[in-house]
Amino acid sequence: MSRALPRPIIDLIESFSGLPGVGPKSASRLAFHLLRAPDAEVQQFAKRLATFRDQLVTCNTCQNIALASPCELCADLSRDASMVCVVEDSLDVVALEKSASFKGRYHVLQGLLSPLDGIGPEQLKIKQLERNLAAGTTTEVILALNPTVEGEATTLYLSKQIAAKTPAITITRLAHGLPVGADLEHADEVTLTRALEGRNSVSAQSAR
């Protein structure tokens, strides 16, 4: 970083650079935008940044981020409780809700299996999923995980666990329309609709 910049600006740029998808140039633009912005705007931004996590909780049922537990989706009695769509994080719930194609319930794993990063089953919300499935109201689990190495590993692990512990439940996964390596949060509504409609069964044999 240039010595021509004061340390507070350098520190702010480095903080922005640590965010996903923000490179050095974008971080610099964000920092200088705040430098030129009115004081009220900067203070409001700082207040929101400092307090937003204090206003959020994790839904005890679906593990989604919410203002209260149960969240609005879990509390909605019009949703189909027999179908549970398992996703990686809350952004995937947002993407699927935009598609307006799924009217069941969700379960957010809050991550994917990644042994190299030290993320195993214990670090994910898998026990909570198994607890919900054991209640006996679910007849289908849709594994809507991103088609990446980590996503495929998590899909395989979950399909084995669910087939072993709750064999009466049908296990499906998203199909048609989601290219390999794509993220759910970046897919458009039509692509997600087709993926939901074309989901495939995950047989117990393939889960072995």
Image: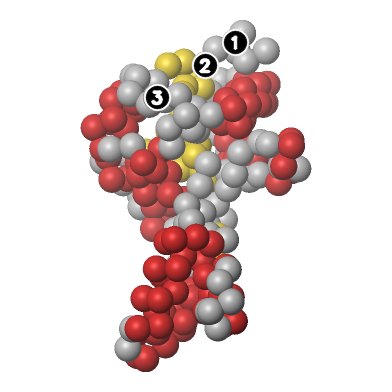
Above or below residue 174? Residue 122 is below
Label 3 secondary element: loop
Question: What x and y, as percent, mark residue 161?
Answer: 67, 26
Q: Is residue 102 left or right of residue 166?
A: left
Name the foreground residue: 164 vs 99. Answer: 99
Residue 135, which numbered label? none
Find disc 2 in the rendering and name its residue.
202
Q: Is residue 69 visible?
A: no
Label 1, label 2: how many angstroms apart (C-alpha)? 7 Å
Q: Is residue 101 left or right of residue 161?
A: left
Q: Residue furthest top?
A: 205
Please identify, in this view, whether the residue under mark 2 or under mark 3 is nearer the observer.
Answer: 3
Question: What x and y, as percent, mark residue 12?
Answer: 53, 75
Write the residue at 43% across / 49% down: 91
Find disc 1 in the rendering and name its residue.
206
Question: What x and y, as percent, mark residue 109?
Answer: 58, 43
Mark 3 residue crowding within 10 angstroms, few (<14) / some (14–19) / many (20+): few
Name the foreground residue: 45 vs 198. Answer: 45
Quadrant assignment for the C terminus: top right
> Label 2 is placed on what type of residue?
Val
Q: Is residue 89 visible?
A: yes
Label 1, label 3: how many angstroms apart (C-alpha)? 21 Å
Write the residue at 51% across / 22% down: 171
Question: What x and y, as percent, mark residue 149?
Answer: 59, 27
Within the image, what quadrant is residue 158 found in?
top right
Mark 2 residue crowding within 10 angstroms, few (<14) / some (14–19) / many (20+): many
Find disc 3 in the rendering and name its residue.
179
Label 2 secondary element: loop
> Label 1 is placed on what type of residue?
Ser
Quadrant assignment for the N terminus: bottom right
Pointer 1 with pointer 2, Cβ within 8 A: yes
Label 1 secondary element: loop
